[in-house]
Image (tube, rainbow, N blue to C red):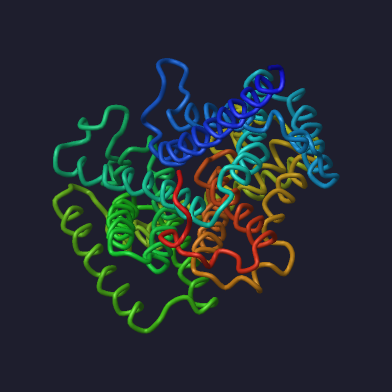
Amino acid sequence: MSTTFHRSTEVAQMEKQDFALKAGRVLLYLGLTFVSITVLRFGESGITFGDIFIFASLVFTILSRLDRSDLYTLRPGAVIITGMLVIGGLLATFSALNPLGSALVLVRILIVAVILPWQAIYLLSDTRFLYRGAFAFALGGGITGAGTIAQSVLGPGVIPGTEITNAGRYTGFAQHVSDTGGITSAALIVAFGLIIAATTRRQRFGAAAVALGAGIGLILSGSVSGLIAVAVGFLIFVIRRAIRPGTAVLIAVAGAAVFWIASAIQAATSNALDPWQRILQTLGLSAGGRYATSEIRASTYQTAVDKTFLNPFGYGLDPASSIVDGTFPAHNLLLAALYQGGLIFAIAILALIVRPFLGRWLRTDPSTLTTAILATAVSAFVFAMTAPSMYNRYFWVPIALLLVARSLAGTTKDPLRASPKASPKGV
């Protein structure tokens, strides 16, 4: 009797763990989609729906791993990097204008840079799951980009909490045009890679629809940094020989169509600047250089470096402490980490960014899915060099997905080559 009871309990426990695993995976998909739709927030807390889904996924992930011996397995390198991040962040908090706010930002960075990769590696344990996770992330960016079309047709009030700037820049389902540029540029690169990697018409059509929304949104956001990031992302595809001549022709045709649609929308918007005008404005080659944001950012970089020499332990991670010149923060991820978090914190951030690129695995895994995620991570980093992206999800999610790809490459005989269609059925 006792043996029968023990076996029944064991089976029930296995089923419970399996449910927790599947639930955690579905919630992670939802989280990866909604992290890009930043206007959707929970009440007055300001917490995004995406963060709620990711946290719920984390709870189920922990439940699924409670009976596993490796739940609390700590790797020396990960412990050192995390320790430096915490110590550096806490030291900077002592100098912060808002110490509590600085501590909360440190928690946010730990979640997206340390916990999310651990969570994703466990849940996206197969190429098929990684494909779906990448598509979920791209889908959120495509929706955000498509929101710019809704704003152009129905007016800015159609999406509460958003705006159209006086230069005719649209936010879509993000709260700031810079965020829209970062989100849509990352989504466009992922979606493009998924178009190539698709094995069915449905997959290809879905990825193409996402790419269309993201592409139009990128142009209407007026983000020069986003355009540069996309150019670098496409360069990665070329370097890794993932684009065939026929595909290149389709890219050119699709790009022309996206540009034509976006230009038609911009033409109907007062004071709107097309991409070329935005580039000239950013570089100070128009309007007498009055709106040369590149010069402003370069000035903040120099100020951040100069002030770091005066206080190598950082000035605080909260938004108020991020201002380097009395007006602007340092629009550069690494310099912002150095100025706000100090030298120890910045080294930890750099280590977290670099770790998925280490080793020979990228050279031995030429698959299109890996190339797509690699291109997205590189383009997100390029964007972060001109934007305050220290805890932005659209920067850290591609890094996490690349870590998943690296994990799969180290455990499978033919890493990331199986198509989603050919993989076993499941969530």
Query: Residue 130 location in percent, x, y?
Result: 51, 52
Residue at point 17%, 36% (across, down):
155
Query: Residue 267 location in percent, x, y?
Result: 16, 55
Q: Nearer the viewer, residue 102 or 76?
A: 76
Quadrant (top left/top right/bottom left/bottom right) for the N terminus: top right
Q: Is residue 93 left or right of residue 394?
A: right
Query: Residue 230 location in percent, x, y?
Result: 44, 62
Say if 366 sits above or below 392 in the image. Answer: below
Quadrant (top left/top right/bottom left/bottom right) for the C terminus: top left
Say if 265 sits above or below 61 in the image. Answer: below
Q: Seen from this angle, which residue lies furthest bottom?
A: 245
Q: Is residue 67 left or right of residue 296?
A: right
Q: How many marks?
A: 0
Q: Seen from this angle, which residue lies furthest front?
A: 1
Q: Nearer the viewer, residue 300 or 152?
A: 152
Q: Is residue 347 left or right of residue 407?
A: right
Residue at point 66%, 73% (across, down):
364
Query: Residue 173 location in percent, x, y?
Result: 33, 38
Q: Nearer the viewer, residue 212 or 405?
A: 405
Q: Quadrant of residue 41?
A: top left
Say if 350 sits above or below 232 in the image. Answer: above
Q: Nearer the viewer, residue 107 or 405?
A: 405
Residue at point 38%, 65% (across, down):
198
